[in-house]
Image (spheres, grey):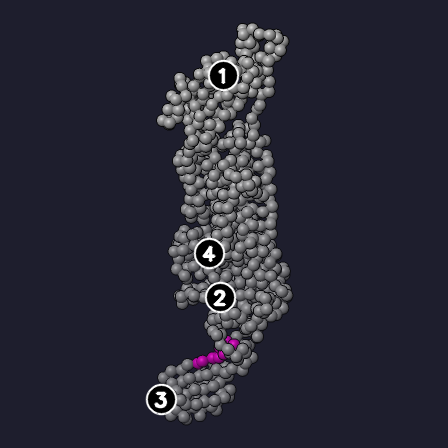
Amino acid sequence: MLHCAELRKSFGKRVAVAGVGFEIAPGETYGLLGPNGAGKTTTISMICGLLSRDGGEVLVDGQPIDTGATRAKAVIGYVPQDLALYPDLSARENLKFFGRLQRLGGRELDRRVDETLDVIGLADRAKERTDGFSGGMKRRLNIGIGLLHRPRLLVLDEPTVGVDPQSRNSILQSVADLESEGMAILYTTHYMEEAERLCDRVGIIDEGLIRAEGTRRELIALVGEKDRIRMVATGDLAAAAAAAERVERVSQASVADGAIDVIVTDARTILPQILELVTAAGAAIRSVEVVEPDLEAVFLHLTGKALRD
Amino acid sequence: MNAALAIAAKDLRQKIRDRSAIIIAVIAPLALAFLFSSALPSSQDSFSASFEVVDLDHGPVAQALVDGPLGNLSQYGITVGRQASEEEARAKLDGGSASVAIVIPAGFSDAIQAARPAEISIIGRADSPLSVQVAQSILAAFVSSVEGVQVAVATVVAQNPGQPDPQIISEVTQAALAAPAPIKTVRDTTSDRLADTATYYGAAMAVLFLFLAAQFGVVSIHAERRAGTLARMLAAPISARGILLGKVLVSLVLGCVSMAIVAVGSTLLTGARWGDPVAVAALILATVLAASGISLLIVGFTRTEEQAGGLSAIVALVLAVLGGSLFPLSQAPEGLAQLSLLTPHAWFIRGINDLSSGEGIAIVVPSLAVLAAIGVVTGAVGLWRAQKVVMAR
């Protein structure tokens, strides 16, 4: 659905994007994960034809996109990072206006507006001016405008920034539902949890370059990180740790602060075996926590800095 | 085009909800037009003065002056009284009940009929220079006919050497005074085609506030950028030019509605007489085009709402002063009158003045051509620049 290659953009002497390229298939959610200033917004601005590029190419559904590609933009739905709404218009009026820009009209436009209001949960507030909406409601409307014309590629630029946890969860669920409907989604974020929850593949971007790309598991494997099982227990903890260390794929088992820490590859598949051995060795387990390596760790490994720097 | 119409419709809905646009586009110009035309003295509608005539001559030439040029002044708002002596006339002047005294000395007619020099005194009050000028003009015209009398008398004397018959001299004098002027001048200058006060202020306020109202359309492109909605528009299948077209449509609609309401409102409220409706409509459209072009130009050379709003206000005010929106150009120095030809305001007001003669659209063709040219040139340069502003990040 989306093919972009060697995208480059500089603002004066500052290089914002230095050769970014990736592809997204229909029905796939691709996350562009990186800290603020990594080049995410500049990249998607070029993909949406909002910004001229210094080099590279963008194809959406086989059609080249640039700032003058008016018709081709119809297949893209763009949800900007900042709220882009008219506060003195109602939710319905906002949707209808942007729908008309997408060349919708008449009953078809009314039908799409009603559907979108249902999807974003604002049907009962449709006639109210948006300046009276909560932040979460505005965010949902911001996304709804991008969905209204049923784009084949939906581009969301950090759509949950500044959103309360409840609305954030609602937004993420909405995005997940869209993927299941076959829409290709490009999702930029600097929240590692969102990328892990939503994205089929993730591109880690920093200083205008994609540092690594793949599924979550591929990225973690790329850096060789292992899982950690932490068991709070009573009894003979030293014997229990020794028993656990004998299991294949366990690289280390140790005792600290009334708990046994086991470093292991693919903890979820081997956890039952470890629990059985530890119990047999005389430990009474009170709680178990599995800590898997995350994209934050991958980012740290690849760039030497934290995502929220 | 549909997208441009959608933008225009959305903007107009917002402007209607935002009362400030209605205040600036409609209420303020109407209120000021009403205020100015009601409160300020008219310099064009009427002239009034009071002349006192002292006829110490009682001869035929003096009688011809009193009954002729001085006798017809009431239709021009000048009352003419008679006094027996210069002292009585001066008392009237001193008392403020007269502005000019005209004293015809004894022997005036005899001097004319004998082809000798003669004189008439004009005594004017210091605070009535215009009345004195009017009296001088009237007497200057009369002097021309007196010269005809002297020529006729001289001819009779030349043909009848010796002592001419007084009866013949008197008849010749009467005939010469009664003869129509051989050359009749017809006044048809632009200064004669001046709209009345109510119409002038209606037109002046309409064009002044047009330039403030027009910015509500085009200049809002900066507000769209700040709000992030411009980027959202650009992500839709619409070009930068299409977006600007939508904004220009808003300026055109707001401008035309504003001026049309002020024209109708001033007609009903202050009795303004704008002239031929078709010609007025054409003038309004051409002026709105010019205002929209200039607004687009301002957008093209600014980066923020604040810059554009400030510059628009300055441009509107400067053009209004230069163009005669704040005071009639007939009262302006010659240099300013020349400079005013660079402004749409002057051409619009000139068009309305031209229409006061009662003629149709043909008489405003020069104004229409200049206004349209201003609109096209500024609009073209503005569009070229504003597209860069729209696409800039």
Tell me if mark 2 has few (under 14), some (14-19) or many (20+) residues whose alpha carbon lies within 10 angstroms of its own: many
Q: CA distance from mark 4 to mark 3?
A: 58 Å
Q: Residue A181's x, y, as percent?
A: 52, 62
Label disc, if present, on residue A85 of the rendered structure = 4
- Discs 4, 2 touching: Cβ within 8 Å: no
Residue at 44% across / 25% down in the picture? B123
Q: CA distance from mark 4 to mark 2?
A: 16 Å
Q: Which residue is mark 2?
A: A158
Taking depth in this image into account, of B286 and B124 the one nearest to the observer is B124
Q: Given the image, on which type of amino acid does mark 3 rest?
A: Thr
Label disc, if present, on residue B108 of the rendered structure = 1
Q: CA distance from mark 2 to mark 1?
A: 102 Å
Residue at 55% across / 32% down in the picture? B190
Q: Is residue A62 above or below residue A204?
A: above
Where residue A272 sits, quadrant-wise, is bottom left
Q: Of label 4 and label 3, which has the lower sequence position?
A: 4
Label disc, if present, on residue A234 of the rendered structure = 3
Question: Does the magenta-highlighted stretch encompass residue B98?
Answer: no
Tell me if mark 3 has few (under 14), some (14-19) or many (20+) residues whose alpha carbon lies within 10 angstroms of its own: some
Q: CA distance from mark 1 to mark 3?
A: 143 Å
Q: Is residue A225 above or below residue B217?
A: below
Q: Is residue A126 visible?
A: no
